[in-house]
Image: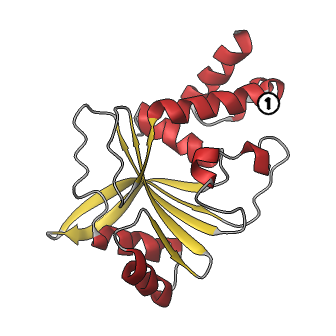
Amino acid sequence: MKNYGEELAYWYLRLNGFFVLDNFVYHQTQYNRNGDADLLAIRLPHVKEPVGGNMVDWDDGLFRYVKDYDVLGVLCEVKTGTRANLTRVFEKQKIIYSLNRIGFSKFEVTEMLYQNDSNFMLQCDGKRFLKLVISEHEVQREENFLAFSLKHIEDFIYNRINTYARQKYTARHFFPSSLMQYMMYRNGKG
């Protein structure tokens, strides 16, 4: 089960056109142990949707780094505790495991890691892979990951709900998330 931060992050990615896996399992990648990533997502080029799925609907904070025609993978870690330990979040083995699961070729994986291993965005031939941290508390942005606050994510979701208030309110029960249903309800009653 996702905690509230992971759920908000999940819907942030979904509302930006991604297909999302939550609690993605790494099988024996570190010291012969299993682990997991909070979210692993992929976004294909030219995503469109009648309600809330147009270029003007995407988050500018994210889309200043990518174009609508990019294939984009995201490995996302969500931190809601006061002490976010980010030292081993994006280890090379986890990145390789994630890139392979999304479907990047062996050549693309090698090229991405060779050229951009320490950057927050790995790229090869119009395909990109983003290392993203979403945190309740301020995180010092480092070169090897992009960071957004949970407040940024929540503001984006409420803005989307406001933009399509009638459509979201009347369809709230179809969202498989009690948190999203409540946010739409709260917005519709306010």
**Residue 163 falls in which quadrant of the image?**
top right
The secondary element bearing badge 1 is classed as: loop
Name the one closer to the observer, 158 or 183: 158
Look at 64% across and 15% down and name the residue there: 186
Viewer can see residue 157: yes
Circle 1 residues within 10 Å: few <14, some 14–19, many ≥20: few
Q: Which amino acid does label 1 sit on?
A: Tyr
Whole-percent x, y for residue 133 in the image: 40, 48
Look at 68% across and 29% down and name the residue there: 159
Q: Is residue 170 left or right of residue 27?
A: right
Indicate whether 174 appears above or below 120. above
Name the one closer to the observer, 166 or 33: 166
Q: Is residue 174 left or right of residue 90?
A: right
Whole-percent x, y for residue 177 in the image: 57, 33
Q: Residue furthest bottom?
A: 107
Residue matched to label 1: 164
Whole-percent x, y for residue 135 in the image: 38, 38
Indicate whether 110 appears above or below 82. below
Q: Residue furthest left?
A: 31
Which image quarter holds the N terminus?
top left
Look at 60% across and 21% down and name the residue there: 182
Which image quarter holds the C terminus?
top right
